[in-house]
Amino acid sequence: MSRRTDLGRVLLVSGWQTVNIGDVAHTPGTVRALHELGGAEVVLWPRRLGARERTMLKERFPALRILGDARDSAPDELTDEVREAIGWADVCVHASGPSLVGAEQIDLWRAHTDKPYGFFGITVDPLSPYADSLERSGRIIRAIDGDLLAPEDRARLAEAAFVWCRDSLTAEFLATQGLDRGVAFGPDATVVVDVEDEAAADRFVTETGVRPGRFVCVVPRLRYTPYHELRDDGRSPSEVRRDAINAGWVDRDLGLLRDVVTAYVRRTDDDVVVVPEMSYAVALAQQRLADWPADVAHRVHVLPRFWELGEAASVYRRATAVLSMECHSPLIALAQGTPALYLRQSTDTVKGQMYADLGAADRIRELDDAEPGEVLTALLALRGEEARARTRTLAQDARERVARMVDAVPRPTRAPA
């Protein structure tokens, strides 16, 4: 990434949660883009960060200043450090995310300054929790002929200086709502994340016994994340319903994953490691993906712990490919130049459209309709230098798109200090 020096001071709203290394990746990806492409000084205003994420960010970006978690204050509370940061900043940027996650922080910015703000790669899914393929979801979105935005979200989006949508279906939806000024596709900033941990990756290789360049990382997922298990605070009626949907699909979904892995090992004699993108997936894999046929069991490993973003990125770089039911592990792999295949569940949001938007429509499969043989063929096609060369091209194209996103962030109008 080449460096520019005209972006000025940015207050970055990010840090959505720490139980998902994909959500963790939004922050270093956005900081890198703003700092290295825009030459910005960045202050991070996180919604929620853990100690290990703060350490990771400070190690990668020593000059980064990090405020206290917004979740520790009342939604309308303006702490002294936030007041100072709002006065200091030239612009506020809401990082990539699954929605307007930092809406309360954006509202504080809007209430206390008229300086510009915008959104750096978000999804606004008007269909969730309605479940369908991306193709049918697109047809439904294009048929919307009424107002589906909450007034508060409409105001936040309409007054933004820029709205980069991390999938084109979000941009199409916002157009149906009369919001198209400054709205366009711009990928999730995870595509430029470069946090790494080589020492941890070395330990991973020793721990699992895999052969670098001859193993695939496989990422399992339930149809819905069981957040009530992570919070341990009881279930709402909607979570009861989601648990039932998970139970109805888990055998089929993980059974397909098991069939693909078994056939892949038999065909290649390569290793496979089942790894988590979300913390709950550690127990899921141990319960559902621990027992394998005798002829492949010595090649299949289940990581018995939740790992950090840097370790995952460095491991993905050493892998042949990544096969993931989660959306962001393939993006982390893309940033490392490693081919990946995303198995999208229909219960996931329209964010998966970003793969086609990035020129990688052949690297996503709709899991509802997929057959093991089809997935195996697609996975085998990711082996070899041709697939890696194409991945490097896709990654470079994604970085260039992010550069254009940075160009759209308003430059400061104040006199230089």
Image (tube, rainbow, N blue to C red):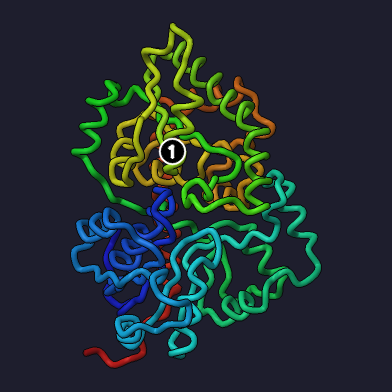
Can you say whether 410 is above or below 402 in the image? below
**Left or right of 411 on screen, residue 261:** right
Q: Residues within 10 Å of mark 1 (few under 14, many from 20)?
A: some
**Left or right of 103 on screen, residue 36:** left
SS at circle 1: helix
Can you say whether 181 is above or below 144 in the image? below
> Which of the 4 image quadrants contains residue 43?
bottom left
Q: Callout 1, which amino acid?
A: Arg
Q: Position of residue 169 (x, y in %)?
A: 64, 57
Q: Position of residue 72 (x, y in %)?
A: 38, 70
Q: Which residue is mark 1?
A: 390
- In front here: 115 or 391? 115
Q: Position of residue 193 (x, y in %)?
A: 35, 53
Image point (36%, 24%), residue name: 215
> Which of the 4 image quadrants contains residue 37?
bottom left
Image point (33%, 46%), residue name: 309
**Left or right of 56 on screen, residue 324:** right
Image point (32%, 91%), residue name: 414
**Left or right of 2 on screen, residue 375:** right
